[in-house]
Image: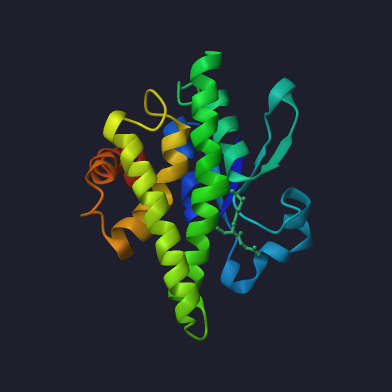
Amino acid sequence: MIDLYTWDTDNGRKARHAMEESGLEHTIKLVNLQKQEQFEPEFLKISPGHKIPALIDHDGPGGETISLCESGAILKYLATKAGNGLYPSDPLAQAKVDQWLFYGSATYTTLAQQYGYFWVRAPEPIEEAKEYYDGVLRDMMATIDRHLGDNEYMAGDYSIADISIYADTHIHGVQRIGLDDYPNLKRWHDVIEARPAVQRAWAPF
Ligand SMILES: N[C@@H](CCC(=O)N[C@@H](CS)C(=O)NCC(=O)O)C(=O)O
């Protein structure tokens, strides 16, 4: 049994998305970021940097209990444990999935979160920062759109690389910027959105 610590954010949805695709038995444990529950001492033992998502697998490798944070590590762990093909075992295919998985977590989501801060959550509007992150987000969306012009999915078949990039495309691309200028990204987004696992992962908590 896996306990998944999550909340209604891009990274939180990524982990739920990977969990739903895995079919693994799990329990959702909500960490209310608005109430600062991520700073609870018990949670910090699982996620030292006070960030969701995190998980505890009570039946980890060798039957040991393992705790894990960082969405990229969690996506790899769940796909590997499930053996559902979303993290390929072929080294060539794996290297390309890793490339876009890291792009998703280290570049795309990290910078999209800055966009979200200055456009949605900042107490005072700072026009220069809003404009800057609008340009950054549109540049990343154009990058992914170009890649998807030549590729059906981010790296070979549908994989955790797609899961890593879907959340911020859905939140900021669809709900804020719009995908009309990014037709390949829109085609890819809509295919992923239609997956039953995605519908479950994005349902209200
Ligand atoms: N690099 C981390 C980032 C996780 C992250 O940014 N989590 C946010 C929510 S999306 C969070 O928990 N913020 C609370 C805090 O920093 O105190 C990952 O990919 O999991």
Task: Name the residue: 37% across, 28% down.
Answer: 158
- Left or right: where 187 falls relative to 109: left
The answer to whether one can see residue 172 in this image is yes
138 w.r.t. 176: above or below? above
Task: Name the residue: 23% across, 41% down.
Answer: 187
Question: Which residue is most to the bottom?
Answer: 124
Q: Quadrant of the N terminus?
A: top right
The answer to whether one can see residue 12 in this image is no
Q: How many marks?
A: 0
Q: Quadrant of residue 155?
A: top left
- In this picture the colour scheme is rainbow
- Left or right: where 204 falls relative to 66: left
Question: Which residue is most to the top?
Answer: 90
The one nearer the camera, 186 or 60, is 186
Task: Name the residue: 61% across, 73% down.
Answer: 35
Which quadrant of the figure shows ligand 1?
bottom right
